[in-house]
Amino acid sequence: MHNNTWVLSDLPPGCKVLGCKWILKRKMKVDGTIDKHKARLVIQGFRQKEGIDYFDTYAPVSIISTIRLLLALTAIHNLVIHQMDVNTAFLNGELDEEIYMKQPEGFVMPVNEHKFDDVVLSNGFALNQADKFVYSKFDTSGKGVMICLYVDDMLIFGTDLEE
């Protein structure tokens, strides 16, 4: 609820409810010691049926030949490159469908124990239909940017790092 990824609501008649689970990870330092613990709540989207629960899926995954081409264009046109990771990429996708999820175990609020989580404000879960992206944008003078995506990682190629 902190990232506006869901609101508690009543389940409309005929709607499907998906479960969820916690994914726990230990991030390690280079020397092998624990850096931090991370927890992520994921919805069980594998229970959805294509053509019934969702209609369009896409994962932006660039192939190696595309990356090589962009690197060659960078060398030829003296472009600048920047790499970045989008920490909350799946929190920013917009859904056409309404998704309902059971409240996480241990989270159920006493007043709302019979309510379900309505994932409509944004998609904070790695569901198939959440990915949105932009490839390139150039103005008439030739200044612009190309973005190469690999799920939530980006290589950004541009004519000017400042713009």
Image: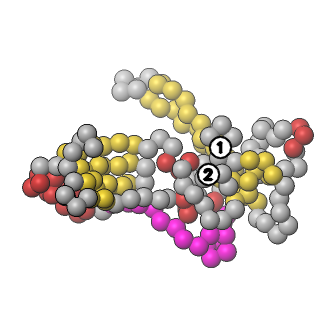
Direction front: furthest residue: 140
Instruction: Pick the residue in front: 24 or 66.
Output: 66
Image-based side of 27 in relation to 150, left or right: right
- The residue wearing badge 2 is 122
Would you say residue 56 sits in the magenta stretch?
yes
Name the residue: 65% across, 43% down.
4
Residue 94 point in image, percent of width and height: 57, 57
Is tag 2's residue or tag 1's residue first in the polypeptide sequence?
Answer: 1
Name the residue: 59% across, 36% down.
39
Residue 29 point in image, percent of width and height: 40, 26
Image-based side of 84 in relation to 86, left or right: left
Are there few (<14), some (14-19), or many (20+) residues within 10 Å of tag 2? some
Would you say residue 120 sits in the magenta stretch?
no
- The quarter in which the C terminus is drawn is top left
- The quarter in which the N terminus is drawn is top right
Which residue range is magenta in the image?
46-62
Image-based side of 75 in relation to 130, left or right: left
